[in-house]
Structures are given as C-alpha cells and as structure tokens.
Amino acid sequence: MYRVFEALDELVTIVEEARGVPMTSSCVVPRGDTLELLDDIREALPAEVDDAQDVLDKRDEIVQTARTEAETTVSTANEQAERTVSEAGSEAERLVAEAKARAEQLVADAQAEAERTVSAGQAEYHDLTERARAESERMIQAGRDAYDRSVEDGRAEQARLVSQTEVVQAAHGEAGRIVDEAHAEADKQRTDCDAYVDGKLAEFSELLSSTLRTVDSGRNHLRGTSGGYNGAGTATGSTGGRGFYDFQAH
C-alpha cells in the first residue's frame, strides 16, 4: 500500500509539472512514465481490493440470494409456527374433551351415589315409619286396654261400694280417681308414642340432611375442578339432578 501512495504522488507531480497545451486546460504528460507508474499501482494493490471488487460486482446476486434465503426461512418458520399452533390446538381440544368426559363421569357417579343414598334413605324412612306406626298402634291399643280394664275395675268397685250405704260417697271418689288415672295413663302412653315417633323422624331427618350436604359438597367440588368447562358441566349437573331435588322438596 505504501508503493501505491508513492506512485500516486509521482503521478500528481508529473501532471502538475506537465507542459500545458496552449488555449486549453489540457497538458502533455510522458506516456511511458505514466504507464509505468500505473502498472506499479496495479501490482501494488492488495488482493483484497480485487476480491472486494468481485463482491461489488456480485452484490446484486448476493443480495438476491440472501433475500431468497430469508424468504425461504421466513416461509419455513411460518409453516412450522402454523403446524405448531395447529398441533397445540388439537392437543388442547383433546385435553378439553378428556376433561369434559371425566367431569361428566364424575357427575354421573355423584348422581348415581346420590340416588342410591336417597333410595336407602327412603327405605330407612319407610321402615322407621312402619315400625313407629306399629309401635304407636301397639301402645295406643295397650292404653285402650288399660283404660278399659281400669274403667271396668272402677265400675265393679263402684257397684260393690254402692251396696254399702256408708261408703257410697267414698266409692264415687275412688271410682272417679280410677277413671282419672286411666285417662292419665292413656294420655301418657299417647304422649310417649308421639315422642318415640318424633324422635325416629328427627333421626331420619338428620340422616337425609347429612346425605344432602355430602351430595352438594361433591357437586360443588366438581364445579370447582371443571374451570374452563363450567357452562356445559353445570347444565348437565342441573338437569341430571332434577329428580333428586324434587324428592328433597317433597
């Protein structure tokens, strides 16, 4: 590169010292010296300059090739992105479908368990009701029998006492007392029977309330775990549970 600058300085000196052509701005320079200096410059130029010129000559081709490769890369990336998005959508749809099926299965299982529990509760209710009714009838009958016996005993005692003038008044009092005791015993037995029936019904009511709380808790748990699919899951649960709430209302 030093020889290049040196040759250029010599060319400048030759041109500056050249003899001018009259009436023009041209000059006369020695051809041989000038060509020799130009050859020196050409030989002194590094190979990188020639390579750079080749790059400049092929610039448009390189730019076009780079643009084509860039467009190809972008197109490939877009296709890959679309394929990835499509696969992700398919996977999401599959997961949603599985979650929906699982939720529906859980709801169906909960409904079946609720129906089984309600059926068992109904059977228990009928059994308790029948036993309470039988016990009530037995106690009422026993009270009636005791009442009838007390009345008969009172009447017999009254008839016996009537025959004795001096104790007629006492007999009336005793007979009234016996009749009152019979009535009181009958009322007591009726009260005991009602208390027994009420207790059994209260036990059954507590059983049903516990069952309903368990079912509601299960259903609320299912709603909470079906997040992105709440609308359809709730609609299915509401329709499937209609018979259960109809029974609760009755």
Image: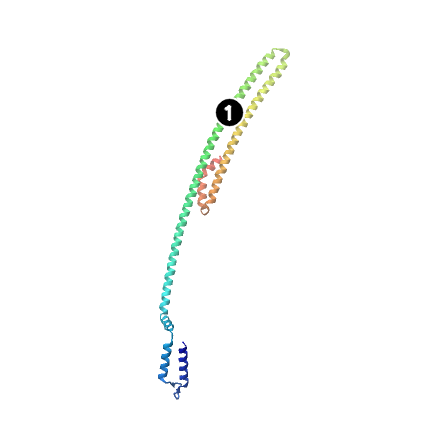
Task: Count residues near mark 1 (Cα–Cα under 10 Å), then give few for <14, some for 14-19, many for 20+.
Answer: some
Q: Quadrant of residue 66?
A: bottom left
Indicate the quadrant containing the N terminus: top left, top right, bottom left or bottom right.
bottom left
In the picture as drawn, the residue positioned furthest to the front comes out as 2
Residue visible at 41% across and 80% down?
6
Image coordinates for residue 196, horizontal then vertical, percent: 53, 27
**Depth check, front residue: 20 or 44:** 44
In the picture as drawn, the residue positioned furthest to the right comes out as 166
In the picture as drawn, the residue positioned furthest to the bottom comes out as 22
Residue visible at 40% across and 82% down?
10
Q: Amino acid at mark 1?
A: Glu
- SS of the residue at dot 1? helix
**Residue 58 versus residue 182 in the image, above or below:** below
Image coordinates for residue 170, horizontal then vertical, percent: 63, 15
Image coordinates for residue 175, horizontal then vertical, percent: 60, 16
Image coordinates for residue 113, horizontal then vertical, percent: 45, 37
Which residue position is annotated with label 1?
Answer: 135
**Residue 128 appears left or right of 47:** right
**Residue 126 versus residue 159 in the image, above or below:** below
What colour scheme does the image use? rainbow
Q: Quadrant of residue 146?
A: top right
**Residue 237 versus residue 155 in the image, above or below:** below
